[in-house]
Amino acid sequence: MKYRQRDTREVTAVGETSEGRVIAAHGRHYLVEPAAGGAPIQCFPRGKKSEVAVGDRVQYAAIAADQGAILAILPRVTLLYRSDQYKSKVFAANVDHLLIVLATEPHFSEDLLGRALIAAEAAGIAATIVLNKTDVAPALPAARARLAPYAALGYRVVEISARQAPDAAADTLLGLIGHDACLLLGQSGMGKSTLVNLLVPGADAATREISSALNSGRHTTTFTRLFTLPDRERSGEGPNGSNGSNGASLIDSPGFQEFGLHHLSEGQLERAFPEFRPLLGGCRYYNCRHLREPDCAILAGVASGAVLPARHALYAQLVHESSQMVR
Ligand SMILES: Nc1nc2c(ncn2[C@@H]2O[C@H](COP(=O)(O)OP(=O)(O)OP(=O)(O)O)[C@@H](O)[C@H]2O)c(=O)[nH]1
Ligand SMILES: [Zn+2]
């Protein structure tokens, strides 16, 4: 197994502190890629640290030839997570750009799409909607119609067919990725694994190897994994402008059922809806919650059509979740 058979001559001296990037996580087992180069090594957090996430840059101390202890998490540029009433679950750290993978079929959840966009907005991460399976022609017009309002909000929507036009799909995605650290999110069946395999040749084999290094057994899809991509120039204007420090990478995270956003405050929520922003400040009450207050600019926006009722309903649901957070 590759990660257990490190050449001891290139191993950091035991006790020495080094920096690296977390490229896989399974429970409290992490795989850290040394900043200085060389094979990834297994690390465990020392003590009861806040959760280490894939994408984190960490300081670690070698405790054996092939093992390290994570001593500190370096300051994060971004952090994307979901939460319910009691706990939060980090998707990844230092992500520049979220790629939300949807498909013409099966039917994608607009609730999940809305939540992913809000999570990205709140975390200061650019988001792009990737509509896959455009070859399924009968389902294409309806999918496009469902996505039109998001394009109108300013979100970039790209269309691909991983099956019918894989080269064009890879080209489109690599162009979007540019130099960014990208997180792929998608419901089951949208084609996320197909896309990872398209962009990262050998991804399956690498994942199996890491899975055994992390002792995650047969549950190869239960951990988050970062793949470094060859850097290339971004074609066209990128939506974000990466922070420049990451380099192109693709983070694949396991499927999830709920995308709770209980951790977002009401103030964060109202600003995470781009269509609300020009209206904020126009309400009669400075602390308006935009739910049923008189002379509310957002509710007026719903009445005039500037804010879609479904988006306001999502906002109201998220405010409700926020109020349930055990803070
Ligand atoms: N028609 C069509 N089918 C596709 C396309 N891309 C992927 N698929 C198929 O869609 C199905 C789901 O693809 P996966 O890549 O396994 O999807 P996933 O999102 O990773 O789903 P899980 O593995 O369940 O998490 C597979 O049968 C793929 O072959 C596409 O562009 N067009
Ligand atoms: Zn209001």
Image (cartoon, rainbow, N blue to C red):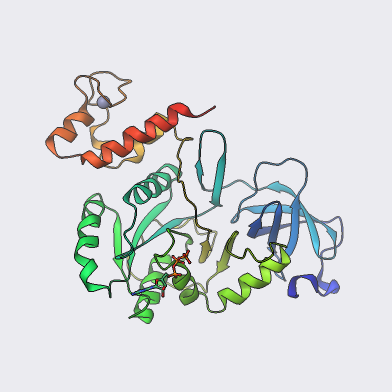
Quadrant of the picture in which ligand 2 is shown: top left
Q: Quadrant of the N terminus?
A: bottom right
**Residue 55: where, in percent of width, then height?**
59, 56
Q: Does 126 appear above or below 195?
A: above
Within the image, what quadrant is residue 9 found in? bottom right
**Residue 135: where, in percent of width, then height?**
28, 75
**Residue 164: where, in percent of width, then height?**
33, 80
> From the viewer's perspective, is 75 left or right of 165?
right
Q: Does 272 appear above or below 163?
A: above
**Residue found at x 32% / y 51%:** 110
Q: Quadrant of the C terminus?
A: top right
**Residue found at x 34% / y 47%:** 111
**Residue found at x 33% / y 80%:** 165
Res. 239 in view: no
**Residue 313: where, in percent of width, then height?**
28, 36
Near-viewer residue (76 or 47): 47
Res. 75 in view: yes
**Residue found at x 21% / y 70%:** 138
> From the viewer's perspective, is 266 left or right of 64?
left
Near-viewer residue (71 or 42): 42
Q: Does 190 appear above or below 230?
A: above
Q: Does 2 appear above or below 325?
A: below
Figure label count: 0
Near-viewer residue (175 or 212): 212
